[in-house]
Amino acid sequence: MTGDERSRDLDVDWSFRADAPHTVDLDFGSYQAGSVWTLSRDLLIAGLRAPAGEGDVHIELFDDTRVLIALAGAEGIALLAASVDAVDGFLAATARVVPPGSEHTRIDWDQGLADLLAA
């Protein structure tokens, strides 16, 4: 976190749901209960090729083996380092479930519109 000179290993659960195919959830529950960040799958894919992201999330390759993910929040910025191979493998698995470009076929647009109108 910004302002602290500390680092630690975190167990972060990455998940992908076919009914929310544009997003990937990072669950930091082992570190802080209820702490889940939802990231764009396209942003993760882009960040493996070149620096990507605006706003609260930035993704960039650090070297041939690590990708850096910066998450900005009210308490500062968390800078995560993850294995490029692990992230690439995870994204490849999501692509087998919902190929990039076909996300629109997996979204229940009628339910989304009903939820929006009911709000």
Image: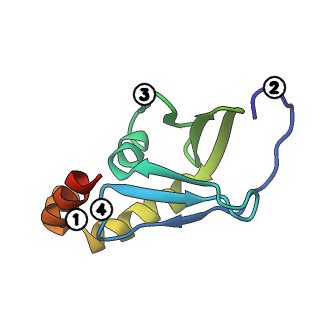
- Give the labeled residue for mark 2: 3
The residue wearing badge 1 is 99
Q: Amino acid at mark 1?
A: Pro
Categorize mark 1 by other alpha carbons within 10 Å: few (<14), some (14-19), many (20+): few
Q: In the shown orientation, is residue 52 left or right of residue 112?
A: right
Q: List the residue tagged with mark 4.
A: 21
Q: On the picture, is 13 further left or further right than 17? A: right
Looking at the rendered image, the quarter that the N terminus falls into is top right
Q: Is residue 82 above or below residue 79?
A: below
Distance, label 2 to label 1, CA atoms, is: 40 Å
Residue shown at 59%/38% (left/top)? Answer: 71
Q: Mark 3 = which residue?
A: 54
Nearer the camera: disc 2 or disc 1:
2
Tell me the element at label 3: loop
* 54 or 87, nearer to the observer: 54
71, above or below 37, in the image:
above
